[in-house]
Amino acid sequence: MGLTREQGNGLALKMFGEYYSKQDSSSLSPEKVSQREFGIGDFERKIKFRHAEFKNANELKDYLVKQTPAFVSCSTAYYSHPSFRPMENKGWLGSELVFDIDATDMHLACQKEHGSSWVCDSCFTSVRDEAIKLIEEFLVPDFGFSNHEISVNFSGNRGYHVHVSNESILKLDSNARKEISRYITGSGISFEDFFIVEEIGQGKRIKRLAGPKPTEPGWRGRIARSVIKDISMGADHLISTGMDAKTARNIYKKRALIEMGINNGNWDMVYVKDKAQFWSDVIKSHAIAQSDRIDENVTNDTGHMIRLANTIHGSTGLLSRKMGVQKLPSFEPMSEAVVLPDAPIKVRANTKAALHMKNETFGPYPNAEAEIPGYAAMYLFLKGFAEIMR
Ligand SMILES: [Zn+2]
């Protein structure tokens, strides 16, 4: 006989609490803890109640150990009185700038196969690359933030949260934040913003497509550099970006000529059918994937709550581990965010794909019993792919 859902949840919370009890209170605490609003969730609702506050790191740790919730969220804003309500009475002091990069917003091909609740190795790599792209191609070069002003934490499930804590962004209102979001997602930019058809020669007989050069700042340079890079990666890569095979082979064959043209702002060295649509698609493919519902986007909302870094995610048992920017490229969530105990637990699991954790492979399980390490058992149980056997 297996444990009931409730008994399994209780076992998970016991493990979460034991983990918290062994941690240093400062590692569990956000900066300026006393100015943050907290949201507390159970297994049904990620934020069941909000407007909670903690005077200091010890008080927060004490709560996590004794009352152990399934989810803990924390405001990206700082307030004079975080527990006051309604929101207007809290005394807003400023908000961090936070970007929520999640695999579900990236419309990955693999997700169509395995569904949105399963996270495969390719999902993890894609979402990590997206977070790196946000930092290396937007936040640092275009906005001028430095690496030490940026911190990253794994979301605990299938994404990353990128936090910027620069004094100049604290007081930005939600309109300014919306503009930043629109910039990095490439919203509202189109072919006409970057390319003009120059008419040379007699009448309209000779046209030339003039576009951005790689040395230009911001989006213009990014488009030019990205296209040169895409072309150098071969015809198959071009086809994978949605180009038809004939055009892709033609472009790859003439790549030296095309690159020379783009370096001089001349984008007409090769024939492309339906140019406007073609280059608009290229622009989109180099933007950052964030929530399509731009009005509910974490980045814009000065009153938003986000998973507290270094706490455990109740749908996975993984830690929303905080790291510096330098760590991100080598971060392996399924090893480095694993914090629950190894002690084996017997499960009945039903999975279509193998689970990879801490360099071991578990399953796939065709509705079968297995005795596996506690962290893997809890991951499958919390995601709804297994029940825990007694
Ligand atoms: Zn996947």
Image: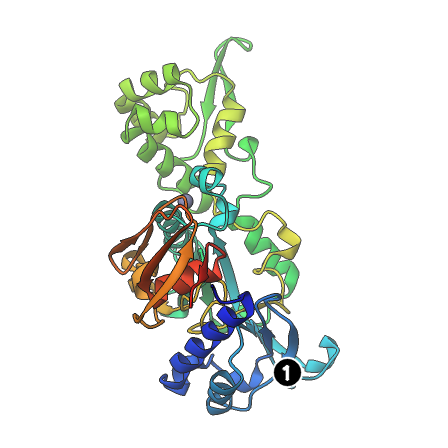
Q: Residue drawn at (54%, 49%), measured in percent from left and top?
A: 183
Q: What residue would you read off at disc 1?
A: 82
Amino acid type, mark 1: Pro
**Where residue 303 sits in the image (x, y, percent)?**
64, 69
Q: Position of residue 264 (x, y in %)?
A: 35, 30
- Quadrant hosting residue 270: top left
**Where residue 269 appears, x then y in whole percent?**
37, 19
Side (left or right) of 310 relative to 296: left
Position of residue 48 in the picture relative to residue 27 (left or right)? right
Does residue 154 appear anywhere in the picture? no
Residue 146 in the image: state x and y as whole percent: 37, 65
Assess mark 1: CB under 8 A from ligand 1?
no
Image quarter for residue 154?
bottom left
Rendered position, 365 above or below 73: above
Q: Name the image quarter holding the C terminus.
A: bottom left
Q: Count of labels shown?
A: 1
Residue under the image location 53 percent in, 68 percent down: 169
Occupied quadrant, residue 332? bottom left
Residue at (52% x, 31% y) in the render: 280
Give whichever of 295, 67 is nearer the camera. Answer: 67
Q: Is residue 192 above or below residue 251?
A: below
